[in-house]
Amino acid sequence: MRHNKRSFYFNNHFMYDTIIVGAGFAGAVLAERLASQKQQRVLVIDKRRHTGGNCHDSYDGHGVLVHRYGPHLFHTSNRAVFQYLSQFTDWHHYEHSVLAYIDGQKVPVPFNLNTLSALFPASLAQSLENKLIGRYGYGTKVPILTLRAEDDPELKFLADFIYDKMFVNYTAKQWGCKPEDIAPEVTARVPVHISRDNRYFQDAYQALPKHGYSKLFDALLDHPAISVLLNTDYKQVLTIDFEREAMTAFGAPFNGNLIYTGPIDELFGYRLGSLPYRSLQFQFEHFNEAFFQEATTVNYPNNHDFTRITEFKRASGQKVDGTTILKEFPQDYDPQDSTRNIPYYPVFTDNNTALYRQYRALAESFGRLILVGRLAEYRYYDMDDIVERALQVFADEFA
Ligand code: FAD
Ligand code: UDP
């Protein structure tokens, strides 16, 4: 599947109906659909040495399957997305569980009635539980910022406790700001659960690709009409003239479609300024022990510079001697600094969203350009969201 640039340059530049920048879920799903359903010839370009984008996984030196760009737990309530991906992988069913280290104890996250019982004396926990159930009903979920807006003194006391112990310092590490200074949807991803369900997600389908994400991507891209060019920044082989709506690929005019899944500000040469992102540094550690910790992920809101530790074999179910963990250290993004130049998370503030919209407007007039993906759309897409989005783009634009 992999070709060297020289043969692309001399032989293949007339061949493609669609060129896709980025071999993550957005790019790979669209490549698969276009090749298998529309008989299109597709070129996928990625600057990394592998496909899969941030979902890439591989075996470390100790034979443990690890997620190279942070823990990726697949979960969805979208049956169509699950069925679509099931064509390309078998699954290892796994429901994610997370603990947070708070006041010397490891307690369930999202904060729920079990967390309440673990952290408060029994009578106070019972009284707060009654209050929560009376106010919201059993089985509901309440974002922390909503709970904090309560007038009731007992609920307010609880909201402040959860905010202080679980959210404020974690968010400061992850985003460099307070929870209320970032879009409320971000902290609402981990709402307070008025239930005793300790699972991190409640989706109907929760699983990991049985043989890893990389094998899933190999299967998605395994089609004779799909070519993959890795280790290549698209700017090395493509030029885009937005004013004339003209493109060249490998030096020759390219009249097909461009699907772009990289950062939108980069696509426009940062002409309106840089969009902010958060980056991460990953520290993997191996131990010659069967297991390192009590749950797949333990969050450290108030201790250490990292946000969380993930132990992969607890999620993958891999039977292997020893165990490998990952610590995630959030950091500012800087495209010029190779230690912090991967834009993992768009930073969702009103100003940044406004700047994104200006970039988006620049792209609107160029009919052959399609923007899709976490970076191109500046959205907090989970894996299932981006698969759903790619399938929708295919239906809207190509079907
Ligand atoms: P990406 O995977 O980022 O792919 C974009 C690709 O474009 C990259 O491979 C990049 O190299 C390439 N590219 C960029 N610029 C260029 C260029 N100039 N030239 C060529 N190629 C370029 N989702 C979940 O559902 N569950 C999880 O548990 C989960 N955990 C996550 C943990 C972390 C730390 C992060 C960062 C994300 C997590 N996600 C999770 C989200 C998941 O990673 C995304 O939903 C998914 O990767 C989005 O796919 P994408 O194709 O839009 O982007
Ligand atoms: N969050 C927090 N404390 C936690 C877990 C999450 O403050 O123990 C906040 C934090 O702002 C984080 C957001 O909720 O960025 C979303 O958490 P999630 O686990 O969904 O983040 P991701 O896995 O996408 O990094």
Image: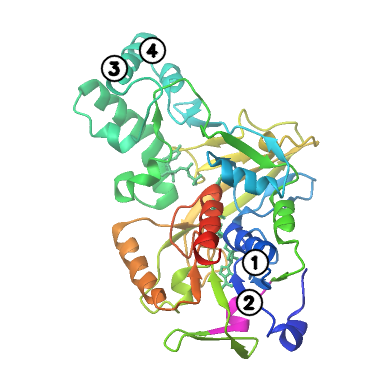
Comes first in the chain, label 3 or label 4: 4
In the image, the residue with mark 4 has its CB under 8 Å from the nearest atom of ligand 2? no
- Answer left or right for 380 relative to 57: left
Q: Residue at x 71, y 61 (%)?
A: 221
Q: Pinpoint residue 380: horizontal percent, then vertical percent.
A: 45, 52
Residue nearer the viewer, 384 or 110: 384
Comes first in the chain, label 2 or label 3: 2
Label 2: element kind: loop
Res. 71 visible in picture: no
Comes first in the chain, label 2 or label 4: 2
Q: How many marks?
A: 4
Q: Mark 2 is on which residue type?
A: Asp
Label 3: element kind: helix
Name the residue that disc number 2 marks: 17
Name the residue that disc number 3 marks: 134
Image region (quadrant) for ligand 1: bottom right
Is residue 256 part of the magenta span, yes or no?
A: no
Comes first in the chain, label 1 or label 3: 1
Q: Mark 3 is on which residue type?
A: Gly
Q: Residue at x 22, y 30 (%)?
A: 150
Comes first in the chain, label 2 or label 1: 2
- Which label lies toward us, 2 or 3? 2
Query: Distance from label 2 to label 3 (Cα)?
Result: 59 Å
Is residue 237 part of the magenta span, yes or no?
A: yes
Q: Residue at x 44, y 22 (%)?
A: 115
- Which label lies toward us, 3 or 4? 3
- Which label lies toward us, 2 or 1? 1
Check residue 121 in the rendering and tell me which mark sits there, or answer none.
Answer: 4
